[in-house]
Image (cartoon, rainbow, N blue to C red):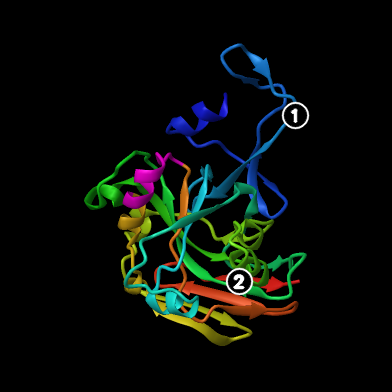
């Protein structure tokens, strides 16, 4: 089965663990393309376990909205009253899945001396579309989880100062930390509720989801105007103020009302 057929269908393939991610592997002998060409080598499909089922959620693209809480926008030097929503992407193999009830080792990345946490609600798309009205956008959500958009802040700022793309600060191995998927039928939609992050037991970030400048529904609507969305797309929905650095040995705990906490230790 080729990748386009895989993501276009309603079925979800089972996966096996690979590195820090829950992943399934497409066999190298599998056919691909209309001429029956065979895969030169196997490339893992990244998947996330779905709570309460034997299914996994296949990840197609990772979208992240920037500066979606007013106070965080100000601390990053922007004016939240005038700035329209903007998005960037991370590669799917940046995902580090953290099972509920565990403390995962999270490697401090190379090249940086200013490594930052950002706690976020993550929305998982189960039905695709283009030009989706905001009033219908939540119908496209399969489920939710909570995550960390980890950032090499010094590299991000250096690239920004040079007017260059700052993927090197955002899109690297293990930079998309998240928990298992909770289906909407289990949790409902998240429009309000506490979101916080602690480092070594000390609260660093604390806000309410209702403080988002652009709701999850509005994010989906805006994204679908730029790119057609597909099942398997996920959206990191922005972080509150007081982002800051961590060092090796630090324990990060994150929380969103209605979801189990997630914990990682920087190693």
Name the foreground residue: 213 vs 93.
213
Give the number of the disc on residue 263: 2
The quarter of the picture where the N terminus appears is top right
Report the residue at 60% width, 11% height from top.
35
Horizontal side of residue 87 vs 220, given as left or right? right
Report the residue at 37% width, 66% height from top.
83
Horizontal side of residue 41 vs 95, given as left or right? right
- On the question of residue 98 being in view, the answer is no
Circle 2: is it few (<14), some (14-19), or many (20+) Cα within 10 Å? many
Q: Which residue is mark 1?
A: 41
Which type of secondary structure does the marked residue at label 2 adopt?
A: strand
Name the foreground residue: 74 vs 259.
74
* Image position, residue 142 (x, y; %): 39, 48
Residue 252 sits in quarter: bottom right
Circle 1: is it few (<14), some (14-19), or many (20+) Cα within 10 Å? few
Q: Answer above or below: position of 239 versus 1.
A: below
Report the residue at 29% width, 47% height from top.
139
Q: Which residues fall within the magenta stretch?
A: 221-231
Horizontal side of residue 124 vs 167, given as left or right? left
* Image position, residue 162 (x, y; %): 62, 64
Whether residues under marks 2 and 1 lie with C-beta atoms below 8 angstroms apart, the answer is no
Name the foreground residue: 164 vs 218.
164
Which type of secondary structure does the marked residue at label 1 adopt?
A: loop
- On the question of residue 75 being in view, the answer is yes
Report the residue at 56% width, 14% height from top.
34
- Given the current orientation, which residue lies at the most extreme bottom position? 202
Horizontal side of residue 40 vs 24, given as left or right? right
Give the number of the disc on residue 189: none
Q: Residues under labels 2 and 1: Cα distance?
A: 34 Å
* Image position, residue 206 (x, y; %): 45, 81
63 part of magenta stretch: no
């Amino acid at each position: 089965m080729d990748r386009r057929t895989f993501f276009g269908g309603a079925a979800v393939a089972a996966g096996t663990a690979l590195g820090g991610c829950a992943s399934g592997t497409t066999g190298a002998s599998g056919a691909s393309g209309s001429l029956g060409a065979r895969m030169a080598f196997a490339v893992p499909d990244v998947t996330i376990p779905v709570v309460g089922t034997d299914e996994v959620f296949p990840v197609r693209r990772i979208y992240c909205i920037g500066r979606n809480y007013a106070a965080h926008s100000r601390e990053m030097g922007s004016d939240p009253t005038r700035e329209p929503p903007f998005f960037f992407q991370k590669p799917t193999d940046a995902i580090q899945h953290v099972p509920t009830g565990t403390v995962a080792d999270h490697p401090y990345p190379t090249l940086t001396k200013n490594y930052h946490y950002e706690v976020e609600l993550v929305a998982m798309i189960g039905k695709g579309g283009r030009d989706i009205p905001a009033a219908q956008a939540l119908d496209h959500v399969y489920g939710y989880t909570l995550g960390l958009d980890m950032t090499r802040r010094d590299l991000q700022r250096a690239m920004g100062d040079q007017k260059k793309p700052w993927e090197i600060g955002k899109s690297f191995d293990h930079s998309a930390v998240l928990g298992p998927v909770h289906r909407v039928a289990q949790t409902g939609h998240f429009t309000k509720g506490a979101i916080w992050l602690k480092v070594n037991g000390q609260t660093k970030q604390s806000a309410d989801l209702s403080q988002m400048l652009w709701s999850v529904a509005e994010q989906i609507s805006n994204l679908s105007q730029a790119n057609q969305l597909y099942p398997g797309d996920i959206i990191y929905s922005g972080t509150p103020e007081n982002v800051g650095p961590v060092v090796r040995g630090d324990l990060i705990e994150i929380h969103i009302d209605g979801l189990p906490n997630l914990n990682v230790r920087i190693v």
